[in-house]
Image (cartoon, rainbow, N blue to C red):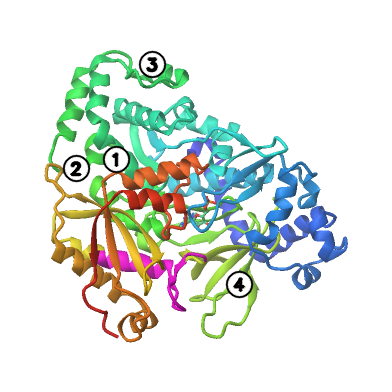
Amino acid sequence: MSLSSDLKSLDEMKKVLEDLTLNVKQVQDDLLEEILAHNANTEYLQRFLHGRSDKELFKKNVPIVTYKDVEPYIERVANGEPSDVISAYPITRFTFSSGTSGGKRKLLPFNMKYLENIIFISKLHSFVICRHINDAEQGKVLRFDFIKPESTTPSGLPAVPVSTNVLKSDYFRNLASKHHTSPNEITFCGDSKQSMYCHLLSGLVQRKDVVSVSAAFASALVRAIDFLKEYWKELCSNIRLGQVSEWIEDISCRNCVSEILGGPNPELANLIEKECNQISWEGIITRLWPKTKFIECIVTGQMTQYISTLEFYSNKLPIICMNYLSSETALGINLNPLCKPQDVSYTFMPNMAYFEFLLVDEVNKVEIIVDLVDVKLGCYYEALVTSFTGLYRYRMEDVLLVTGFYNNAPQFRFIHRNDVALSIDVETTTEEELLKAVANGKMVLESSDLTLTDFTWYADISTVPGHYVLYWELKAKKKSTILELDEKLLTECCCTVEETFDFLYRKFRSKDGLIGALEIRVVQPGTFDSVMNFFISEGSSLVQYKTPICMRSIHALAILEDKVFARFFSDKPPPF
Ligand code: AMP
């Protein structure tokens, strides 16, 4: 988070926001004109526009594409052909998406325009926070950021997750060094375990300065607390003795954390020990970092599953969910940061990219595409992006609902990814339905000592008929108790989960016998960490990582299967 001092002035930022949101149409038209004027002679656009750059021709001739369509062009640049295959702006770096939101990992161009946009969003973000939270700048942020070591494309251009490109830029380095409890050396360590340990150590030592605890996604914050559960004794011992554990081998990281530690501090170690030793970890964030005013991370979309855990750990501090960003482009920002997580909507910023919207009309299946200013309240759309990074009418594959307007800028609620769905026969179960089903199943656990820590779905067609499989990692609510699985309870979970699904699923399952009984496979504690480590070893970044809602990777499935220790099935078909 940048602070008010980094903005030219709050008044100036307010004016920028008002101008942009009042003049959405003009800003969008100007932006499209600029993108087309610059890029009309790229090989890609030349095919459709023949060197011209007018909006009508663009709308008429340039096709709507998915990543698969543009991948060959991007690959050509990555393999050494000039940037102008797709972009007039030089592509000097690439980013890859986490590959865990939807299908596979995507390689995408990165350039200064992308970075400028993210810097703009970051400034706006700070402005919005300063406006809503008193004295947000009077302290430090305990922020869990991580980078991935650089890899290169076949032509030698650097390729890293977009978060790494952003964090390594001068602007964000400078910001972090001023306002975060972790010096950049900790974030840049490259080994996520050492990084995580040092983020916590540094944050614990500076506990009285911390005003917010944050990460990009809620899952990373929950992981940080889980890590603390495992390592608090060692962290306390380091603080007591004033010495960093031997296994922190990254020399820059080690040096800067040693400096922060100063010398032995038994008093602080005792205090942390006392808090962490309590049976319940309820409110642990506010107990360890008593001046924390808010938690900040994304809790929309698939991250909603972590809201209750974060509320538990933070004694229901406000959870601020600010940005809607992707490797392709920045999209929007939440201008009402103190709203409930369930009510978060993102106001699209018209200067980020040229946005069009494909109406999601399941019933009539007609293809209606409208401009940003023409979206209608209450309708569902998928955003199409035309950017300065070589993407033209590119489908984002996220389904969004229009919930309101700030001046003339539409606000969207994130609903789900379009490309995530489970299917055995011709039924398709969307990400939203899968999340809802898990939430219902989770409610059945409420009365027990069990709590759900992570999950993923899989359509198992190796059985006849095929069936939906839900991998669950569970833990005991009370730290001291052993995980006991009650067959009746977990069977009830299976039935409740199934009952959530739509008519077609229930018909196929109950009447036609085309879908078999839903199964919950309980995996050993730590399994989802192993799955995450696998994705990270494949190039995902810890910052952008989200457990896939549906698992498609054969390797990740093998990891899950290896750790299954109990299986439960629904024992009756759902009513239909
Ligand atoms: P990546 O490019 O790997 O960072 O993933 C981008 C994707 O993450 C987006 O297309 C969304 O599906 C998801 N995402 C990003 N920001 C949000 C948000 N604020 N709420 C829900 N999902 C998000």
In the shown orientation, is residue 362 left or right of residue 393?
left
Q: Which residue is mark 4?
A: 358
In primary-sequence order, the first of circles 3 and 4 is 3
Q: Which residue is mark 1?
A: 225
Q: Residue at x 18, y 54 (%)?
A: 450
* Tag 4 secondary structure: strand
Q: Are marks 2 and 4 in contact (CB under 8 Å)?
A: no
* Tag 3 secondary structure: helix
Q: Quadrant of residue 139?
A: top left
| Whether residue 411 is situated above or below residue 215 in the rendered picture | below
Q: Determine crowd level at label 3: few under 14, some 14-19, many 20+ residues with C-alpha closer than 10 A.
A: few
Q: CA distance from mark 2 to mark 4?
A: 45 Å
Q: Which residue is mark 3?
A: 259
Residue type at tag 4: Leu
In primary-sequence order, the first of circles 1 and 4 is 1
Residue that extends furthest to the top in the rendered view of this protein: 263
User: Disc 3 or disc 4, which is closer to the eye?
Assistant: 4
Q: Which residue is mark 2?
A: 281
In the shown orientation, is residue 273 left or right of residue 70?
left
**Residue 307, image x and y in percent?**
31, 55
Residue type at tag 1: Ile
